[in-house]
Image: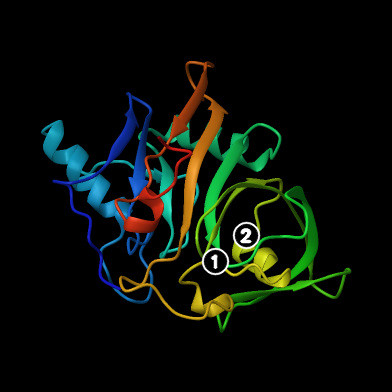
Amino acid sequence: MKVISNEKNLDVLYEDNHLIIINKRAGDIVQGDKTGDTPLSEIVKSYLKEKYHKPGEVFLGVVHRLDRPTTGIVVFAKTSKALSRLNTLFANKTAVEKTYWTMTDNCPTESEGTLVHWLTRNSEKNKSTAHSKEVKDSKKSILHYKVLEKLTNYYLLEIQLITGRHHQIRTQLAAVDCFIKGDLKYGARRSNADGSIHLHARKLSFIHPVKKEKIEIIAPLPDEPLWQKLTVIR
């Protein structure tokens, strides 16, 4: 999957002196990895350098990450003070509300509920496994879900993350046979043509690290046929 973003077409959802929040496209990596592809963090740095005519290095702190094939909200800090405070804020799970939208081929037995698993991570395979009870090296993982809409072949689920684990939504939904569209790694029948999966970081609420005001960001959905069929966005 190739990086498709550049500083000319970044989807900036919010920016002030302390933060910049981006609507990430599928294919972008938030930070550099072994692929050597240009990460979103460097693209945002270039954008800021050009926009503000900065002569030297641009500071940009990565607050959190999204998986490469997912889309939606990513927060970056523009100052070290904002980064330190945001890191503390995001570590406190009750201070930040994360809402995701996802398309799955099946629906949970209840239209609304909570999933609790214990996740173990295989770093070599970059994959997590869900267990119904605690096992060695596992981490308790909790999410709330709600079915928002039924399409012809897929269901739109809204997910509230209570914990933040590696591939948590993908792993927990797969554990209840609700496979995210395009997510071959976790059991989907086929991939999406562009290598994306239908998992979108839709909304983020938190207290601004400097202004101390509540910030609520909603990321528009990808311009893709299935997402655009939804009636809940009309």
Which residue is located at x 29 percent, y 37 percent?
12
Q: Which residue is mark 1?
A: 180
Say which label, 2 or 1, has the lower sequence index: 2
Q: Amino acid at mark 2?
A: Ile
Classify mark 1: residues with Cα within 10 Å, few (<14), some (14-19) or many (20+): many
Instruction: Single out the mark in the foreground, 2 or 1.
Output: 1
Q: Residue under circle 2?
A: 169
Disc 1 residue type (three-letter): Ile
Residue at disc 2, secondary structure: helix
Q: Quadrant of residue 99?
A: top right
Relative placement, left or right, of 125 versus 23 is right
Residue positioned 51% across, 65% down in the render? 153
Q: Nearer the viewer, residue 143 or 119?
A: 143
Residue 106 locus on image (x, y percent): 63, 66
Residue contact at pointers 2 and 1, CB within 8 angstroms: yes
Q: Residue at the bottom extreme?
A: 124
Q: Where does the C terminus fall, quadrant-wise?
A: top left
Q: Look at 45% across and 80% down and name the residue there.
A: 190
User: Is 136 drawn above or below residue 165 in the view shown?
Assistant: below
Calculate the distance from the C-alpha at mark 2 to the C-alpha at mark 1: 9 Å
Q: Position of residue 18 (x, y in %)?
A: 38, 27
